[in-house]
Image (tube, grey):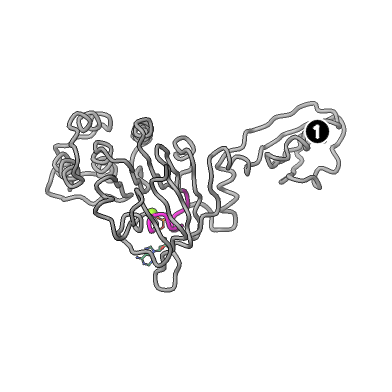
């Protein structure tokens, strides 16, 4: 079942296309990773999904409802965490968590609230003006995960959290998924997404350049090989799927498109393999290749 869907969603600021005909889909019970470097168009897409920006063209729906026209209905069933949380400086963290939960309506789960405060090692008794960025993120995360939403929209939610809290966050996402909830998680940190997401869409310059399950994306990845053979390997550079061949003394290192691995190994084996090491393809490699020549990952 599809909970969130965009069809050729486009958002133009002046004459700048921040979001360019995006098609994404989040299904019930899945974590969808929305991945791209800073300025790619993630937050703009999310602000359209929240009904805060009107699409220039195309369409977006959540729970089958129009995100712009039916924002009130939709917001009863979603929880949103932005990457930069603004809070009421004169209220305590605990008061703001309660306020967020009340604003969201529905059932207040006090037990879950306490559990999350504990989990995130958060002191709710201080005034918000004293909180660091990480603590402000915690306020928003605790309020979101304590609410009984069907869809969590998280826009780079862990900025400012230390690595231990990052793990706590990941646990919360996994618990939500186990409870049948859906999550749209935007990030420029690939490792975060690789662990959590069922499917990802990679956005660059407002366009989705790759999408699918992690398994599907892995087909696009390359395996790293280090080989030593008795005789020098010939004709390797011309083979399909072979990249970045380098010789360092006896060792030949290369990258092979995963779909051509079988052929390449067969070719190499004719030269008397003395040593063969392979490193598994990582999504990081795929990601980096997409950003080669595009200003790098910021
Ligand atoms: N209100 C706006 N007016 C003009 N340009 C904007 C506005 N909001 C975002 N942008 C531009 O749109 C692009 C995408 O921004 P954003 O969606 O925030 O990217 P991301 O969240 O992926 O880092 C950026 O180049 C940004 O400067
Ligand atoms: Mg952003």
Foreground of the two, 283 or 207: 207
Q: Measuring 53% from the left and 48% from the top, which residue is drawn there?
A: 211
- The residue under the point 40% across, 40% down is 28
Q: Residue furthest left?
A: 90
The percent position of residue 99, horizontal first and vertical second, equals 15, 45
Neighbours of disc 1 within 10 Å: few (<14), some (14-19), many (20+): few
Q: Measured along the vertical axis of the image, is residue 148 above or below residue 17?
A: above
Residue at (25% x, 32% y) in the render: 116
Residue 241 located within the stretch drawn in magenta:
no
Q: Please tell me whether mark 1 sits on a helix, a strand or a loop.
A: helix
User: Which quadrant, please, contains the N terminus?
Assistant: top left
The residues colored magenta run 35-44
Q: Nearer the viewer, residue 207 or 251?
A: 207
Tell me residue 275's x, y (percent): 76, 27
Is residue 84 shown above or below 92? below
Q: Give the image quarter of residue 283.
A: top right
Where on the image, by quarter, is ligand 1? bottom left
Drawn side of residue 283 relative to residue 145, left or right: right
8 left or right, relative to 69: right
Asked if ligand 1 lies within 8 A of label 1, the reply is no
Which residue is nearer to you in this view: 126 or 169? 169
Residue 97 in the image: state x and y as whole percent. 19, 41
Q: How many marks?
A: 1
**Residue that appears at 27% across and 29% down:** 119
Q: Residue furthest top?
A: 274
Judging by the rendered image, the residue that carries numbered circle 1 is 266
> Would you say 145 lies left or right of 259 here?
left
Q: Residue furthest bottom?
A: 15
Is most of the magenta stretch helix, strand or loop? loop
* Residue 52, horizontal then vertical, whole percent: 30, 59
């Amino acid at each position: 079942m599809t909970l969130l869907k965009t069809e050729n969603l486009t958002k133009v600021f002046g004459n700048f296309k921040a979001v360019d005909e995006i098609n994404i889909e989040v299904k019930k019970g899945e974590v969808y990773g929305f991945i791209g470097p800073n300025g790619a168009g993630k937050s703009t897409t999310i602000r359209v999904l929240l009904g805060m920006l009107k699409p220039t063209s195309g369409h977006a729906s959540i729970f089958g409802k129009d995100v712009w026209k039916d924002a009130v209905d939709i917001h009863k069933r979603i929880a949103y965490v932005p990457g930069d949380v603004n809070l009421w400086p004169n209220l305590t963290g605990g008061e703001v968590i309660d306020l967020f939960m009340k604003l969201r309506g529905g059932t207040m789960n006090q037990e879950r609230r306490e559990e999350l405060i504990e989990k995130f090692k958060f002191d709710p008794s201080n005034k918000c003006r004293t909180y660091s960025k990480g603590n402000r993120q915690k306020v928003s995360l605790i309020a979101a995960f304590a609410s009984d939403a069907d869809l969590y929209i998280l826009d780079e939610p862990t900025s400012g959290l230390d690595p231990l809290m990052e793990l706590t966050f990941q646990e919360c996402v996994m618990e939500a998924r186990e409870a049948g909830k859906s999550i749209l998680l935007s990030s420029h940190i690939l490792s975060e997404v690789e662990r959590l997401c069922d499917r990802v869409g990679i956005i660059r310059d407002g366009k989705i350049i790759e999408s699918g399950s992690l398994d599907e994306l892995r087909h696009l990845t390359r395996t790293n090989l280090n080989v030593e053979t008795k005789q020098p390997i010939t004709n390797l550079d011309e083979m399909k799927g072979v990249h970045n061949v380098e010789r360092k003394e006896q060792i030949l290192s290369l990258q092979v498109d995963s779909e051509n691995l079988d052929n390449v190994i067969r070719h190499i084996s004719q030269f008397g393999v003395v040593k063969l090491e392979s490193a598994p393809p990582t999504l990081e490699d795929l990601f980096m290749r997409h950003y080669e020549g595009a200003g790098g990952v910021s």
